[in-house]
Image (cartoon, helix red, strand yellow):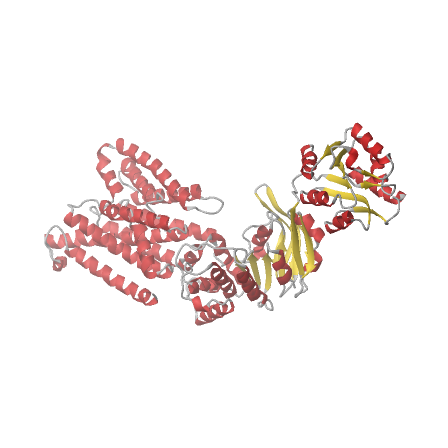
Amino acid sequence: MSRIRLIAIPILICILLASMILAVAIGPTNVSIASLFSPETAGMIVRDVRLPRVIAAALVGCALAVAGTAMQGLFKNSMADPYIIGTSTGGSLGATLSIVFLAGAGLPVLAFAGAAITTFAVYTIARQGGKIPVETLLLSGVALSMLLSAFLSFLMYTSGRSLHQIMFWLMGGFWNVAWDDVFIAILIPIGCVAIYLYARDINIISLGEEDAIHLGVNVERLKRILLFASASLTGIAVSIAGAIGFIGLITPHVMRLIVGPDHRILFPAAALAGGILLVWSDTLARTFANDMPVGIITACFGAPFFIYLLRSRMRA
Amino acid sequence: MKPVEIIDIDVSYGARKILEAVSFYADRGEILGIIGPNGSGKTTLLKAMSRIVAPDSGEVRLSEQGLGTFSFRDLAQQVAVVPQEISISFDYTVREIVMMGRHPYIGRFASERSEDLEICDHAMHLANVTHIAGSSVHEISGGERQRVLIARALAQEPEVLLLDEATSNLDISHQIEILNIIKGLTEDITVISVFHDLNLAAYYCDRLIVLKDRRVYAAGPPKDVLTRETLNTVYGIDALVKPHPLTGKPYILPTYKYAAKRQPERGVHVVCGGGTGSDLLYALHKEGFRVSTGVLNVFDTDYATATALNIPCVTEAPFSAISPGAREDLARCIAAADAVVVTAMPVGQGNIENIRILEGYRNKRIVLLNGDTHRSFQDCTGGEAEAIIYGLLERGAVTAERIEQVLQFLMGSA
């Protein structure tokens, strides 16, 4: 077990780098990766279309996986993820407001604000006497998502020409990604490192809040930090690629099976795996599926996995 | 310098008061037990000591320093808690859980040093979990999991160890195993533990704090605190307290009757004799009535029953008539009772006063047991007793043939 843990991170790093190189090489147009420095169209495709897109996909995957891992640890519950508890929907609504009323101005800020406010609202609604039971968490997430979806539908209904752009946020995808987005995505590693500093605290809070206090964790502060950081990561991810579901749910879960529940290893493992997963999902989407929104692909893999999780929990 | 001092704390959850004016202390190296019925505030008291809840007023002090002045990390270095049970969502190994006890000593940017590993190993050795260090906490038994939590608490190297019924969910052998481990620690550590099992508390604790209705009802060594009276007042049970034949510590033997504390206490005086009242006395006692009896002579079977049940009894020397002093005591008992039950006892000149006195209580409810007629009384007074009984029946005394009827009558007419 511990041997797997030691080699898991280097192996995942290698896979991620190889995946990114391959993903830059693969695409609907047949251009070689060697044309990276060529001044012609082929070089432009690699430099300004594929490269930023692959980097963004890797970083967004990291962000979603780390946010999911943090929320699962915080909520003591492997069902939590930024999509399920409505954070992504909140981010999408923020983005949509920006598109409809501000012609896309301040979109990252509004996406972040939407994600953060929604997370705090779900947290407050689900909280019962200091605890956050799984049922109320999922239900209040669903309930709030429905409400936000209603607002979203209303905005779409009245949006006219921005409808297509809004659809983009709802389905999630990387087709508009340019270097600008990659510069925003640089914030993602910062957020991940901030969360990683609390990995040991998250190990402990996953035993329960009172136990965490007994072991010297400032629980309320930790919760605020984690919710803020997860909402930030989700908000950034949404502002770049829209609401992509299930990465934040599946990745921590699979990685926990492989490297164990210690968040000091789980966070980097999940971050790398999230990057790998999203790079390949996106490559699949743009190469073989006519640039279909990548959220469709992640949902196709993620939803059955979620059902499997529910069933195996019921058996346990 | 006391390791723990509780100074006049009040604790409430919202509008509900949980603890009022609670004060006590713990000495270095002692095991202090906290006992009391459900809802008396035991767990809350422990939570106040580990700063899970904050008192409304008063202060908790650790080595003369207010609890509020500690940071979370500093407090976790001083106080460790073993909870009653823990649900662990993720598949941690035993060693990982125990190592979490070192968290308050490891900085945010640091990881475990070899010293932490050694302390962790030592803690696992003390709690006897070394052999399962690599197992998942989901694979081990409840007793083992509880020992893991003790090891984790020991890894914190605390001055004070708080246990919240840490062995309540375990079988007797695991309870003893774990409490022996804890008893072995107390040279360096002060242990404060909530107990439900009074016999375990009596054996393992140096002193006990008894909580009742949010307050400290009694405090002191087990032999002073665990008395029949205290158990009756605090738990509403009747129990014999004997010294344990091997340990000499108090041992509690419940009589398995329960006094429903919530009901208004009802007093019954039983006039009986010659063994005619024993069953009734036991039945009334078991149902939680406040029973008195007499006048009985000290050789009477009913007197022996009353004594064994701790029922107050007006007594008289054998073979003598009821003295004015005994009559006065009897009058007091009857006045204090809500009802009087007279059994079909043999009545002679010696005890006729027991029923004659009832003529003076016109409004007292009187039940005559075991006889549809007065004739089942063995009248050895030449009709005098019979006349008194007739008179009682005239004035509204009821008769009953079985003890259940008596109980029904007494309970039905509140």
Numbered marks: total: 0
Name the foreground residue: A240 vs B384.
Answer: B384
Residue B29 percent coordinates (x, y): 62, 66
Residue B115 versus residue B353 in the image, above or below: below
Residue B137 falls in which quadrant of the image? bottom left
Name the foreground residue: A58 vs B283.
Answer: B283
Residue B169 percent coordinates (x, y): 52, 55
Residue A7 versus residue A62 in the image, above or below: below
Residue A66 percent coordinates (x, y): 33, 54
Quadrant location of the N terminus of chain B in the rendered image: bottom right
Q: Is residue A79 visible?
A: no
Q: Is residue A60 left or right of residue B277?
A: left
Quadrant location of the C terminus of chain B in the rendered image: top right
Residue at figure coordinates x 43%, y 46% from the top left: A133
Residue A92 falls in which quadrant of the image? top left
Name the foreground residue: B339 vs B14.
Answer: B339
Name the foreground residue: A297 vs B339.
Answer: B339
Q: Is residue B39 left or right of residue A252?
A: right
Residue B242 percent coordinates (x, y): 69, 59
